Image (cartoon, rainbow, N blue to C red):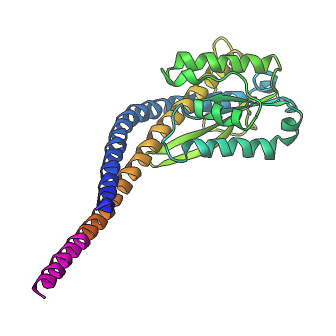
Amino acid sequence: MANLKEIRNRIASVKTTRQVTSAMKMVSAAKLKKAQDSILQIRPYADKLYEILTSLSASLENAEDSVYTQQREPEKVLLVVINSNRGLCGAFNSNISKRAIELALTKYPQQLKTGKLQFLPIGKQAEKFLKSNKFPTIKAHNEVFDSLNFESTALISSELLTNFTNKKYDRVELVYNKFKNAAVQIVTAEQFLPVEIQEKKKTATGNFNFIYEPSQEYIVQELIPRSLRIQFYKALLDSNAAEHGARMTAMHKATDNATDLIRDLTLTFNKARQAAITNEILEVTNGAEALNG
């Protein structure tokens, strides 16, 4: 009977776990809807702004003279690692951490060896991983996910722009999860600074003459920092939506696994109880036969 009690306790424990994972799944689903709407709304604007920027820049003679497009030897590099503040979202955090370390070891091994490669963690999970593995990190910005909006992210991106123009860093790269759907997140590593200007080519607008006010050069110089702030905000929105999608999927799988485990434990419990009843019947029968004999 002790075995039956143990199985019964396990069933009760798994049922409690299933209630928790099911509740977390519903919470993540609600948060995902809001986060998904946010990233889907900003993507067309961010992509079009970037398209305009590259189109205008490609037609300028001295587009490379901008402080944000200066291509320097990457002696000092900053990797911005965007993760989440919480776990229980499958491989969401570990995939980003692995990609960031892979990028450091394969693309910037010399900078890492000489201490000229630094990490900026955004998210408690990224900060925890980097510090536990003794990678050089600067002040984390974990609070940004408490109230994710353009104003809070613009402060971080403006700081990155300032550090780049002051030549504190020669290159800044972002590592984050790009949201595709609730079940799929794309691990992405992209160069944030300096801005890569495409080679001049004939575009759809190449045959038209536009009048720029005040000037084409001025518009480009104004668009670059604005576009960079928008791109940084979009990366954080992508990561936020991807996190909720990953957590919802993870909790859905955990709930299904708990249901399967409960079914297996219930079957085991019924078999054990049937065996116990059979043993009791045999004992009674043997006792009666002994008395009759």
Magenta-drawn stretch contains 125? no
Residue closer to the observer: 198 or 208 = 198
Report the magenta stretch's main SS: helix
**What is the count of numbered marks?**
0
User: Can the viewer see residue 140 in this picture?
Assistant: yes
Magenta-drawn stretch contains 292? yes
Residue closer to the observer: 60 or 138 = 138
Would you say 232 lies left or right of 89 here? right
- Asked if residue 66 is positioned above or below residue 183 in the image, the reply reads above
Q: Residue furthest left?
A: 292
Residue 13 locus on image (x, y percent): 34, 48
Q: Residue at x 35, y 41 (%)?
A: 20
Would you say 277 lies left or right of 61 here? left
Q: On the image, which quarter does residue 100 sit in?
A: top right
Q: Residue at x 77, y 30 (%)?
A: 136
Would you say 228 lies left or right of 104 here? left
Would you say 259 lies left or right of 158 here? left
Residue 265 locus on image (x, y percent): 32, 62
Residue 148 locus on image (x, y percent): 49, 23
- Asked if residue 264 is positioned above or below residue 222 in the image, the reply reads below
Residue closer to the observer: 243 or 202 = 243
Q: On the image, which quarter does residue 137 sit in?
A: top right
Q: What range is drawn magenta here? A: 274-293
Q: Residue furthest bottom?
A: 293
Location of the N terminus (image quadrant): bottom left
Q: Residue at x 86, y 35 (%)?
A: 111
User: Can the viewer see residue 191 in this picture?
Assistant: no
Residue 208 locus on image (x, y percent): 62, 30
Q: Residue at x 61, y 27 (%)?
A: 232
